[in-house]
Amino acid sequence: MSDATNQYVEAIYDFRRARRRAKLRQVLAQLAGGASSLLEYDEVRRRLHAVESSYQLLEDVPLDAIVGSVGRYQDFTREFLPKQDSDEPRWA
């Protein structure tokens, strides 16, 4: 097999491991009464009573501090694990 084929196969295995972890985390979150999904950006803004600003600043944000996303928030858990099997080709 070529190197590109090996990398693709490895990416598929990685995706499937991530999907299993996502499913497990979703079940555990439901049992604990918590949430495992990302929030929609507008929902986060509403909850924080945030206002938009024209001032932009680049800063590092720890991954575990991210709770929402502007787009595709329904496709990932809060740990950015894939929630949709249909995302496998895109992941690979």
Image: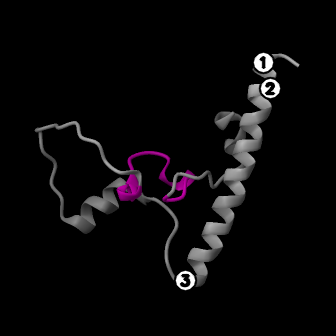
Q: Nearer the viewer, residue 72 or 13?
A: 13
**CB of mark 3 within 8 Å of CB of mark 1?**
no
Mark 1 crowd level (few <14, some 14–19, many ≥20, 10 Å Cα): few
Mark 2 crowd level (few <14, some 14–19, many ≥20, 10 Å Cα): few
Q: What is the image's colouring?
A: one colour
Q: Element type at marker 1? A: helix
Q: Nearer the viewer, residue 71 or 33?
A: 33
Q: What residue do we see at 65% from left, 34% from top? A: 90
**Mark 1 to mark 2: distance in Å?**
5 Å
**CB of mark 2 within 8 Å of CB of mark 3?**
no
Stretch in magenta: 64-78
**CB of mark 1 within 8 Å of CB of mark 2?**
yes
Residue 45 to residue 10: above or below: below
Amino acid type, residue under disc 2 in the picture: Asn
Left or right for 92, reference 3: left
Q: Which residue is mark 1?
A: 3
